[in-house]
Amino acid sequence: MKGEKDLEILVVEDNQIIATEVDRILKKGGYRSSSVRKGKEAIDYLNRNKNKSMIVISDIDMPEIDGSQLCQQIKANSDLEEIPVILLVSLSSPDDIIKCFQCGADSFVHKPPDEQALLSRIHSILKNNEIRKEPKNRFNMEVFCGEQKHCINTNNMQTAGLLFSLCDAFTQKNRELEQISSELSKLKEREAKLSDLSFKDELTDTFNRKVFITLVEQQLKIASRTKSGKSLFLIDVDNLKLINDTMGHETGDKALKHVATVLKETFRHADIIGRIGGDEFAALLIEAKKDNEKNISDRLQKNFADYIAKESIRYSLSINTAFVSYDPTYPCSIDELLSWADTLMYNQRRGNIGMGG
């Protein structure tokens, strides 16, 4: 490997968002980079540029040839074996570390990549380049993860590199936990301030709009930190004005209470439920599971129908629902989520495909 000024870093990443972030970090660190989306494209690129000073940064999770397989192919090629490989891993289980050892990776960085950690790994590789060229005494070791045994053939240089990578990953996680702790502290302070306000809508005993918006905004900030998804449900009471006009406002008030009762029975205690308009409710699911919103919407409608039958409600009372997901990869505000849900509900009604009655 030549000097840093001759260095080119090849980024192998099929996720455009992560690829863009890695490119931003590398540019900030003063490094030249190229990028490809697949492992095969990476091998072809490296073979065409054998004489260049290279480092490869690859996501371990990719279709066809994943990052560990790509690393194995690089290390098995006599023309490419000296190219350092840094893998981007999720660290969702110890298996990620085992894969790094087994495939011959020189280092790894937890994803989404932390700027300081990634530049530190590159700097370490460059500073220890001459040592990396020396003959390496390889040795075998057995590692147990749970009840599963792994046999690993490694060397001191790789072991040191991966141990420092693990240290960086723990440091990054600790910073993230500190940020989350700070957000939670701010949330508690905000909740304390809210104690002076009227938390609840007096009629339905759900949060009023102002408090609902405040609590959801805090949850979205935490979701962005923890990279966790959320689901927002919008619930609209059908024909509330007609009920008020024909049967009186007392009946209309009871209708709203009925809806609130079913919402509180359907959603979890930890979820945030609020009355955000005259005939509109909203609920934020704290522990949202992917692709589960439709099941929850169906359960809500069933619970509502069962409740009406049990209470022997004689007038027509029904609800429409719409749900949208919060993706921390693309942060947005609560106002945007509500607007999307409102548009979705409007389109459902126009197409006569609303989930409500």
Image: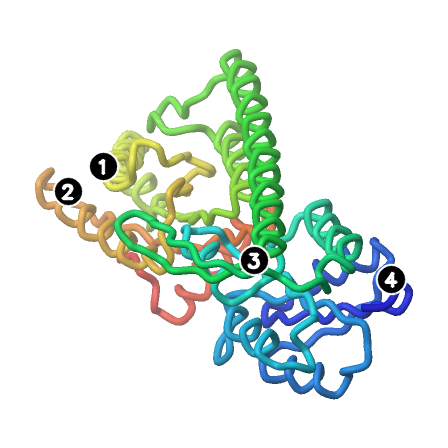
Residue closest to the eye, 228 or 299: 228
Instruction: Out of 263 and 128, give the one closest to the viewer.
Output: 128
Lower position in the chain sequence, tag 2 or tag 3: 3
Nearest to N terminus: mark 4 or mark 2: 4
Say which residue label 4 marks: 4
What amino acid is found at the position of numbered circle 1 in the picture? Answer: Glu
Q: Residue at x 31, y 55 (%)?
A: 149
Tell me how far mark 4 sits from mark 1, CA to CA: 62 Å
- The disc, 4 or 3, on the residue closer to the chain's N-terminal end is 4
State the quadrant of the C terminus.
bottom left
Quadrant in which the N terminus appears? bottom right
| Nearer to me, 303 or 171 | 171
Q: Is residue 259 left or right of residue 84?
A: left
Secondary structure of the residue carrying numbered label 1? helix
SS category of the residue bearing label 2: helix
Residue receiving disc 2: 307
Label 4 – label 2 distance at C-alpha: 70 Å
| Residue drawn at 61 percent across, 49 percent down | 160
Exactly how many numbered labels are in the figure?
4
Instruction: Give SS at disc 3.
Output: strand
Q: Is residue 171 visible?
A: yes
Contact, CB < 8 Å: mark 4 with mark 1? Answer: no
Of tags 4 and 3, which is closer to the observer? 3
| Residue most extreme to the top | 196
Q: Residue 70: which quarter of the image? A: bottom right
**Amino acid type of the residue that numbered disc 2 sits on in the rendered structure:** Tyr
Rendered location of residue 40, percent (x, y): 59, 84
Question: According to the image, label 3 marks what residue?
Answer: 155
Do the CB atoms of the residues marked 1 and 2 lie less than 8 Å apart?
Answer: yes
Identified by mark 4, the residue type is Glu
Q: Residue at x 88, y 64 (%)?
A: 3
Q: Circle 1 is placed at which residue position?
A: 265
